[in-house]
Image (cartoon, helix red, strand yellow):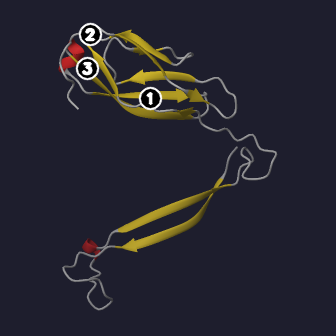
Amino acid sequence: MRKFWPLLTLVFVVAACETPLEPSNVDTDDDQIQTVNIFTFIDVGGDHNHGGDSGDANSPPVIRNPGTQFYEVGEDVILPVSVSDADGDDVACSLDGAPRNLVIDENTHLITGNVSPSSAKESPWVATVSCTDSKVFDSEQFIINVAEPNEEPDV
């Protein structure tokens, strides 16, 4: 079982004054004092290695941002997302905030689909790719602009 010990407790006194706080002008009436406790904890459990070479710390996956994308209604999308994991773990990805017909293959990290007509009306889209190795995750946001054919996208 993991145990946490309080390392530090700070108490702040906040007084309602119109002038700068100095010892001579702080009113200590009970209705004007607010106490805030701030705790910092030390993990004293044995579940993690906090140094040395023998630990099995896990690094999060790293996603290379695909950058701003431009598509026309009806266009087929094939967008690879580059993802790496320093530990060599399997990484699964998801896609949120993209036009409805676009999906990501959670294992190959390939975004595919056909841009629907309604996507242009809601453009630009702020899409988020999130990837996890089942222990930690990373996410990247990028813009998807969609325009009607022969129309310049709003940038």
Q: Earlier in the sequence, mark 1 or mark 2?
A: 1
Horizontal arrangement in the rendering, residue 25 relative to residue 49 (left or right): left
Residue 116 - label: 2
Residue 87 location, x and y as percent? 70, 33
Q: Quadrant of residue 75?
A: top left
Whole-angstrom CA distance, mark 3 to mark 2, is 9 Å
Mark 1 vs mark 2, foreground winner is 1
Q: Quadrant of residue 70?
A: top left
Question: Mark 3 falls on what kind of element?
Answer: strand
Amino acid beneath label 2: Ser
Whole-angstrom CA distance, mark 1 to mark 2, is 21 Å
What residue sits 39% from the left and 33% below the top? 141
Mark 3 vs mark 2, foreground winner is 3
Given residues 43 and 53, the one toward you in this image is 53
Given residues 95 and 73, the one toward you in this image is 73
Horizontal arrangement in the rendering, residue 121 relative to residue 94 (left or right): left
What residue sits 52% from the left and 35% below the top? 138
Residue 69 location, x and y as percent? 35, 25
Amino acid beneath label 1: Pro
- Residue 118 against residue 129 in the figure, above or below: above
Q: Earlier in the sequence, mark 3 or mark 2?
A: 2
Residue corresponding to mark 3: 146
Given residues 76 and 129, the one toward you in this image is 76
Residue 105 location, x and y as percent? 50, 14
Amino acid beneath label 3: Val
